[in-house]
Amino acid sequence: MSSPDPQFNAQGKHKAVQAMFAEIAPTYDRLNHLLSANIDKRWRRLVGKKLEDVLRRPDALVLDLCCGTADLTLELSQQAPQARVIGCDFCHPMLVLGLKKIPSQAALIEGDALHLPVASNTVDAVTNAFGLRNLENVEGGLSEIYRVLKPTGRVAILEFSHPVVPLLRTAFRFYFTKILPQIGGLISGSRQAYSYLPESVSHFPDQKRLAEIMTKVGFTDVSYINLSAGIAALHLGTKR
Ligand SMILES: C[S@@+](CC[C@H](N)C(=O)[O-])C[C@H]1O[C@@H](n2cnc3c(N)ncnc32)[C@H](O)[C@@H]1O
C-alpha cells in the first residue's frame, strides 16, 4: 500500500479532513451503505439501543459528534422522538445534506469536536460514529466529550477497529486496502479519501488501547463490544 499522504498526519490534519469530506459529501451516504453492505445501519442502531435508558428520559439532551450527513442523529431521533438530539460537525456540505434528513425536534450545529461550542456539564449523552479517528488528537477529543457531559453522562464511540479473527483480518485487510479504494474512488471521484480510510484505521488505537485512553481521560465503566468480529467496535463509558 502507498504511504499515507503527509497532509493527513496529525499536524494540519484538520483542514485536509474537512476538505476531503466536503469533496465526497454528495456520494458519502450511498458509498457507506454500498461498501458495508448496509451493515453500518445495524451498527448505528445498536448505539441507540445501548443508550436506551438515557434516550428514554423525557428531557434527554444528546450530542451526536462528527455527525456528518446525520445518519446517527436521525437514528437516535427515531428511537427517542421526545429527546433533543443535536448533531455537530465541522464540514458544512455534510451538514447541508444532513439537514434534509432530520426531523424537526433534532438540530445540527457547525463546530469543531476539539473545541465544542457547548457549555460544560450540560449533555446527557455524547455519540460519535466514525469521527474520532479523524481528529488531530484522539485524547483531546475524548477530553472535550468528557467536559460537555453531565456527571453520570454517557459516551458511545462507534469506530472501525481491528478484526479479532486472524483469517477475517487478512481477508478484510485485502478488501479494505485493495477493493474499497477502487470502488470508493470510482464513485466519489476521490481515490485519496478511500485510501485514507484504511490508512487512518490502521493508525487508530485498537479496542483495548482506546478503552485505556477513555479511562485515562476520566471515564468509568469503560467497555467495548466488537462488531462483525472487530471490524468495528462500540466503546461505552460514563462520566464520574
Ligand atoms: C466518516 S464521517 C462520519 C459521519 C457520521 N457520523 C456517520 O456515521 O456516517 C466523519 C465526520 O467527522 C467529521 N469531522 C472530522 N473531524 C472533525 C472535527 N475536528 N470536528 C467536527 N467534525 C469533524 C467530518 O467532517 C465527517 O463528517
Image (cartoon, rainbow, N blue to C red):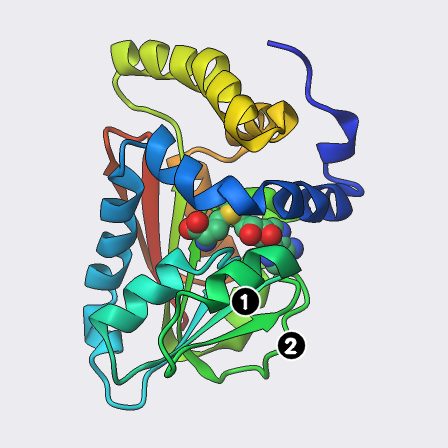
What is the three-letter code of the residue carrying label 2?
Pro
Task: Say what secondary structure mark 2 lies in.
Answer: loop
Quarter of the picture holding the N terminus: top right
In the image, is residue 198 above or below residue 129?
above
Q: For this rendering, which residue is in front, 230 or 174?
A: 174
What is the three-letter code of the residue carrying label 1?
Cys
Asked if disc 2 and disc 1 are in contact, CB closer than 8 Å, the reply is yes
Extreme-bottom residue of the structure:
59
For residue 160, the mark is none
For residue 117, the mark is 2
Q: Position of residue 59 (x, y in %)?
A: 31, 90
Q: For this rendering, which residue is in front, 79 or 161?
A: 79
Label 1 CB-ligand 1 distance < 8 A? yes
Q: Residue at x 54, y 30 (%)?
A: 197
User: On the image, numbered disc 1 is attached to which residue?
Assistant: 88
> Earlier along the polypeptide chain: callout 2 or callout 1?
1
Q: Residue at x 30, y 31 (%)?
A: 230
